[in-house]
Amino acid sequence: MVVKEELLTTLKVVKRTGKKVDFDGSKIALVIKKGFDNVKVLEEDDEVTKYTEKDIQHVYKEVISRIEKEFKGEEKIKIEQIQDLIEESLQKKGYADVYKHFSEYRDRRNQSRQLFSDEKKLHKFLKTIEGLGLKSANEDNNKRENANVDGDTAMGTMLQYGSTVSKEFAKTYLMKNKFSEAHDSGAIHIHDMDFLSMGTTTCMQIELDKLFKNGFSTGHGYLRSPQDIISYSALAAIAVQSNQNDQHGGQSIPAFDYYMAPGVLKTFKKQFKQQIYDYLDFESLLDFVNMDRVAKEIDKLNSIEVNIDDFSNFYKESEKLRKLFEKSYEKALQKTNRSTFQAMEAFVHNLNTMHSRAGAQVPFSSVNFGTDTSEEGRMVIKNFLLAIDEGLGKGETPIFPVSIFKVKEGINYNKVDKNYDLFKLACKVSAKRLFPNFSFLDAPFNLEFYKEGDYKTEVGYMGCRTRLMSDVTDLDNQTTGGRGNLSFTSINLPRLGIKHGIVLKEREKADMKAFYGELAELMDLVKDQLLERFEIQCSKHSYNFPFLIEQGLWSGGEKIGPNDRLRKILKHGSLTIGFIGLAETLKALIGKHHGESEEAQKLGLEIIKFMRNRCNEYAKEYNLNFTLIATPAEGLSGRFVDIDKAIYGKLKGVTDKKYYTNSFHIPVHYNISIKNKLKLEAPYHNLTNGGHISYIELDGDTVNNVEAFESVIRLMKELGIGYGAINHPVDRDPVCGYVGIIGDVCPKCGRKEFEGIPMERLNNNCNC
C-alpha cells in the first residue's frame, strides 16, 4: 500500500527555477523507479531489471517517512533536498549499486545544467537520449509504440534518435506543461508524440480509385493510370508505401475489391482479344474475322461475364468459329484468373517486404473487402484470400496487410447470398492463417450509415481497430474513404480505480463521485491537448504532405493551394480519446471485473458511456469529430502498469501482471465461455465509435473444424460486434513448410521438435 501523505498536503516543492509546486509523492516514486530500472542483470542472454516493485516501495516509504519527520511544520522543501534523501535512503537500505547509478546520473545532470542557460527546455533532450544507443529495442515500452519498427537496425536506431529528440522538443516547445506532465506521470498517454511537431495525422482510408483514374506522383516520378490487374496491385502497394511517409500511423484501403475490379476487367479484355487473335492465327482464319471490329466490341464490355451469342455477328453460322470464340473466352478467363492471383500474391509479398520511413518499417497496412458481387470483384476477393492462404515464400503467415472481410446479410452471410462462398472461404483461410479478421456491416452503429448499392458508405476499419464513419462537419457526406484519425490520447483508467476504489483498503465502498469527477477533469485535459495538437496540424501546408494532401488522398486535398492552411479539410478527421484496462479499473473499484459479476458489467458500461457522452458533448461544442476508442494497447499497457506498480505496489487483480488488459476486454486468463465473453463485450462496441475489436481464443487445430470457427464469427455478428478476430495457434515447420498444429513431431515430414531449426509458433495475441 502506498504511504499516506496527509502531513504533506501543505508542503511546497521548490524547483531549481525557484517555482513552487504542490508536493506530489508519485513523482518521487517515479524517480526512484527509474533509478532501480537502470540497474540490470544478465539473464539468459537478456538484460533484465534486477529489482522488483517491493524494492522500490521499500525506498519510497523510507523517503516519505523522513520527509514527514524532518520537514514537519515546514512550508517548503527544495528538489535537491528530496534527491539527497533518496540517495541517503538507497545507501541506508543497502542498494549500493542503485545509489551509484543514481548519484552518477545526478552528477551528469548537474554538469549538463551548467552548459545551458535554459535548464527546463534544453536538458530534457540530454536526459532522454542518454543511453539510447546502448539499449536494445526490447528494453523500453516507448520503443514499441510503433510495433513494426525494428529499433535494433541502423535505420531503426537513427529513427529512435530522431523520435526521442522530437518528442522532447514537442514537450518543451509545443505543448503546455500540464499536458507533458500528465503524460510523464502516467495519467495519460499521448500517442506518437514524436510526430507532434511535424503535424502529421495518424491514419488514412485510401480511396485507390481516385489514384488509379489519372495516375499519381510519388514525388520521384509520375505513374500512369494502370491498365491491367498486375499494375493495379503494384500501384496499390506503392500508394500505401508512399502515404506511410506522410503519416505516423497506418494505411487502410476501405473497399479493396471494388478498387481492383476494373483492373480485372481490363486484363480480361486484353486476354480475350489476344486469345481470339491467337486461335484465328493458328487456324489460319484471320481473313474471315474483322479483328478491329472484334476489339471494339470487346472494349465495350462492362463485365467478364460474357454471352458468346453477343458475338454471333463475327462467326455467323460457322460452328468452328463459334467454338473458337468459346475457347478464347474460357482461356481468357483462365489467364485473367491466374493473373489476378499473381497480382494478389505480389501485393501481399510487397506489403510484407517493401520498406518505408528510411527503411526501418514495412507499412502498417490494412485492406477491407468482401462485398463486391461483380464477377471481377469476386475474382479479386477469391484470389486475395488464396494468396493469404498460400503464405509467403517459405510458407510464413503474412502479417500485412491486415485483411478484414466485411460481413453483410444479402451479400455474403446467407446461403442464398451471391458471395456466400467467399465468406466460407474467408473462414477457412482465417482458420489456417489467423487472417482475415471480420467486420460486421449489420451492427447497428455500422448499418446506420449504410446505403444499399453504395460501397462508399460501408465502414472501413484499420487492422488495429480504428474506425471512422460519421462526420459532424458534413452531415451530407457520411463516408469512410478519404479521411482518417488525426490523433489520439489514452487515459489511465486503472489508476483512477485505484485512487477511488476499495483496493487500497482505505474505504469500504468506491467513491464514484470522486472517480467521475477526476475522469471528467482528465477528459477535459485530453480534449484540450487534442485541440492544441489539431492547431499544429492545421498550421501546416500542402507541401508538407506531398502525397497525402497534394495527390488528393485526404478528401479535398487536391483543392488546397500551396499557401492554404489545412483546417478546411482536416476538420473531417477524428480527434480521439482512448482508454485501456477497464477490467483492472473495476477490480480496483469494487473487487470484481465485468466478467465476474453483473454489478461490474453495469458499472463498466456506465463508465464507458460517461466517456462517450462527454466525447459527444465535445463534438457538438467544437463541431469536430471527437470520438472514443478502445485503445490498441501495444507498449502502453506495460507502461501504465509499471508506473502504477511503482506508486502503489503490487495490487492483486490490478497491478500484479506485466500489463493492463486491452481496452474493455474480459481478461484473457479468466475462464469464461465464448458466448458469454462476446455477449459482455458487444455493448462496448456501440459506445466506442472511434474503434474497437473483440478477440476470441480457440485451442487446437481450427483447420480441421472450420464449422466451429464459422459459428463463432456468426455469433459475433448476431450479438452486434462491430469488428472481431479469432486467435488460435499457428505453427510452421521452416524445413518442410508445413502449416498447422505441430506437436513434438511434424505431421508432414516427421521431423522432431528442435532437430535443427526450431518450429515456428505464432498466435495473434494482444493482452486480449
Image: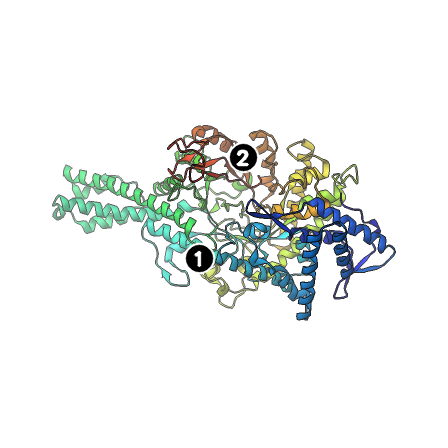
Instruction: Specify the quadrant that holds the C terminus.
Output: top right
- Residue 66, visible in the rendered structure: yes
Given the current orientation, which residue lies at the most extreme right position? 73
Residue 220 location, quadrant: bottom left
Label 2 secondary element = strand
Q: Find residue 733 and name its label.
A: none
Query: Which mark, by number, is residue 696?
Result: 2
Residue 375 location (% of width, % of height): 34, 40
The percent position of residue 527, horizontal first and vertical second, equals 65, 54
> Label 1 sits on what residue type?
Ser
Q: Looking at the image, which residue is at 68% across and 43% down?
A: 494
478 sits to left or right of 258: right
Locate residue 336 relative to residue 180 in the image: left or right: left
| Residue 359 higher or lower than 761, as above or below | below
Q: Amino acid at mark 2?
A: Ile
**Is residue 145 at least partly visible in the picture?**
no
The secondary element bearing badge 1 is classed as helix
Left or right: residue 425 versus residue 725 is: left
- Give the mark nearer the N terminus: 2 vs 1: 1
Labels 2 and 1 touching (C-beta < 8 A):
no
Within 10 Å of disc 2 (Cα), the crowding (few <14, some 14-19, many 20+) is: many
Disc 1: CA contacts within 10 A as few (<14), some (14-19) or many (>=20):
many
Q: How many numbered marks does the figure carry?
A: 2
Quadrant where the N terminus is found in the figure: top right
What residue is pinned by disc 1?
Answer: 242
Residue 559, x across and y down, in percent? 47, 62
Cα gap from disc 2 to disc 1, whole angstroms: 34 Å
- Comparing 589 with 203, the one in front is 589
Q: Which residue occupies the foreground of this view, 189 or 259? A: 189
Q: Residue at x 66, y 70 (%)?
A: 115
Question: Residue 408 location, x and y as percent?
Answer: 47, 37
- Colouring convention used in this rendered image of the protein: rainbow
